[in-house]
Image: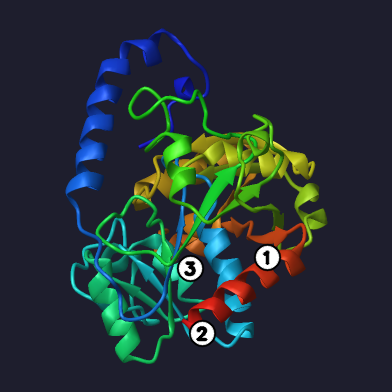
Amino acid sequence: MKTPAFWRNNSLTSLALAPLSWLYALAAWQDRRCTTAQQAPIPVVSIGNATAGGAGKTPVALALAPMFHALGANVHYISRGYGGKTTHPRRITGEDNWQEVGDEPLLLARTAPTWVSRKRIDAITAAAQEGATLALCDDALQHHALHKDLSLLVIDGPYGIGNGRLLPAGPLREPLSTALARSDAVILIGEDRQQLAARITGLPIFHATLEPTIDPAPLRAHRWLAFAGTGRPEKFFESLRALDIPLAATRAFPDHYPYRTEDIAALRAEAASLGARLITTEKDRVKLPTADASEISLFPVQLVFRAPDAIQEFLRTWLATRTSA
């Protein structure tokens, strides 16, 4: 679904949905209380967030795997494969498509071996049998059936926690305080507009930014119709505007949107009428029909830590503790 605009601020809509938030909170509490966490055969690092989508978990996962590799760990990614059909443990190959395994696992598999399964513990067990010494789980903070050895909470600085309400009245999957209590460190991406860092005590905070991996200068020579189907498409649009890339129009689709040929045809026609070209994200690109993808420009980004040595030392210290245990 698309991120509702009213999630940003308190409004009559969010107030009206508050009773449903209470029911959501009760269901989440029962899930935590009644679920027994299973111990995996190898250490598990969880990358998660307190809000529904768009915080930047996948870029964090892509940035951390090389760091763990440099420290001697054989990292395998673990994903539920949201949007895909796979239910049993499956290692991503170059022949897989997003309809089977989901969109994010295809991005992760470019960096390290990646497994998808409806039950993450099964995927971790399979990865361990293939030589993995560390499981890096994308979006597992609220997955209470799995014991996590290290939990990293990702926060999008500009968006923060929106209006601070639980789903569906706001973007929170759980109260920020609850998420922080189960986390070992925080990765805050971008400007901290809600001043959340001041509310976080007792946990290290690692600041980072999302930066393009291509030279944006050539993009400024054209007008663009930017489209995205991510947790927060406006985050992508804001990134383009911040680099003075001319946008003739923007089109937001629901997260994990399954693009059809007719969708791309409509976008292409609109772009032509505006004298613009099409541009999208890496996550969206993997879901485009093959025949259409070649004519659409890509804006790839990567996570850059403000103090890379600090998080590298944090991970090194944690790994050393795990090795000596």
Q: Find the residue positioned furthest to the top.
A: 12
List x then y, in percent, for residue 107: 48, 68
The amino acid marked with disc number 2 is Ser
Q: Provide the residue designation for mark 2.
A: 324
Q: Residue at x 42, y 24 (%)?
A: 165
Above or below, 229 relative to 70: above
Upstream in sequence: badge 1 or badge 2: 1
Image quarter in which the N terminus is found: top left
Query: What's under tag 3, amino acid-wise?
Result: Leu
Give SS at disc 2: helix
Q: 236 or 191: which is nearer to us?
A: 191
Q: Earlier in the sequence, mark 2 or mark 3?
A: 3
Mark 1 to mark 2 CA distance (whole Å):
20 Å
Residue on which disc 3 sits = 107
Q: Position of residue 5 (x, y in %)?
A: 48, 23
Q: Are marks 1 and 2 in contact (CB under 8 Å)?
A: no
Instruction: Tell whether label 1 touches label 3 (CB within 8 Å).
Output: no
Mark 2 or mark 3, which is nearer to you? Answer: 2
Q: Which class describes the residues within 10 Å of circle 2: few (<14), some (14-19), or many (20+)?
A: few
- Front residue of this view, candidates 113 and 279: 113
Foreground: disc 3 or disc 1:
1
- Which of 218 and 48 lies nearest the eye of the viewer? 48
Say what amino acid the circle numbered 1 marks: Ile
**One can see residue 50 in this view:** yes
Bin the neighbour count of mark 1 within 10 Å (Cα to Cα): few under 14, some 14-19, many 20 and up: many
Identify the image quadrant of residue 303. bottom right
Left or right of 22, for residue 133: right
